[in-house]
Image (cartoon, rainbow, N blue to C red):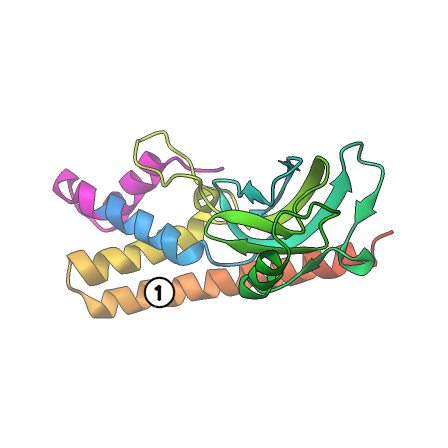
Amino acid sequence: MALTFGQMRDQILAETYRDATFQTAVENAIVSAIKELEIQQLFINQTFQQLTLNQGSNTVNLPADFMSVLMMVLLDSGGTTVYTEASGFKQVPFWDLQTFQYQNIGVPSNPGLWSIYDGQIWVYPIAQQSYLLDLYYYNKDATYPSNYNDTSIWLGDYTQDVTRYTARGIFYRDSLQSPELAASEFAKAADVLAKLKLRNSQRATINTLSV
């Protein structure tokens, strides 16, 4: 069963035999653990959003929980014509895209290139009509937990153990100055994360073979 931020804090305090005077330190350790783990690319943090690219625009704001892109697809406003990497909607480095923008300022057409920069999706050329962008991506917490009942991707059924061990390691290392105990916790976290990655690989294989 998934845990709340406060439940994990209380669990770590109990497991490390500490009282409420260490509450803030444990909360900080949990958030630090989440920040360390959120870069992982697993099945539990894959998601999808459909965004709107307005006519005359060349940028769309990324979702608040965006971490890194899996795939992006361009559709016309009716959703009937689809453009992918194979049919001409290609990802390029941002600076290459900007070179095209500066050479052809203000010439609307069907976007054929895209890039991600500074919290936005950039396309080239400028959109000649409204389009939809199907964005498949790895997500993170839009905001980090801070209140007792707050939740997190990394406090879920699959992820709470690796978060708890990582947080305990950080707590032992940074607050209790116990590198030996910290090393033991980090080893446990690495073992759990390895099993998560194995599960991730198994799911990827199954999905690839599924019809």
| Residue extending furthest toward the top | 149
* Residue at image coords 61%, 40%: 57
Percent from the top left, x then y, of residue 130?
70, 35
Residue at 28% over, 46% down: 12
From this viewpoint, is residue 72 visible? Answer: yes
Q: Residue furthest right?
A: 211
Residue drawn where x is 64% and y is 56% of the image: 104
The residue carrying mark 1 is 186
Q: Is residue 93 left or right of residue 167?
A: right
Question: Magenta part of the protein: which range?
Answer: 1-25
Above or below for 77 versus 90 = above
Q: Foreground: 196 or 135?
A: 135
Q: Please tell me whether residue 176 is drawn above or below residue 150 in the rendered image.
A: below
Horizontal side of residue 63 vs 7, given as left or right? right
Q: Secondary structure at mark 1?
A: helix
Whether residue 139 is visible here, answered yes or no, is: no
Q: Magenta stretch containing residue 17, yes or no?
A: yes
180 left or right of 165? left
Q: Nearer the viewer, residue 96 or 195?
A: 96
> 97 or 155: which is nearer to us?
97
Q: Residue furthest left?
A: 21
Q: Let me know if residue 86 is in the magenta part.
A: no
Please give the count of numbered marks on the rendered protein. Answer: 1
Q: Which kind of residue does numbered mark 1 sit on?
A: Phe
Q: Magenta span: helix, strand or loop, mainly?
A: helix
Q: Residues within 10 Å of mark 1 (few under 14, many from 20)?
A: some
Give percent across and percent down for residue 88.
Answer: 78, 57
Tell me residue 102's x, y (percent): 57, 58
Residue 141 position within the rendered picture, expressed as x and y whole percent measured from the top left: 44, 42
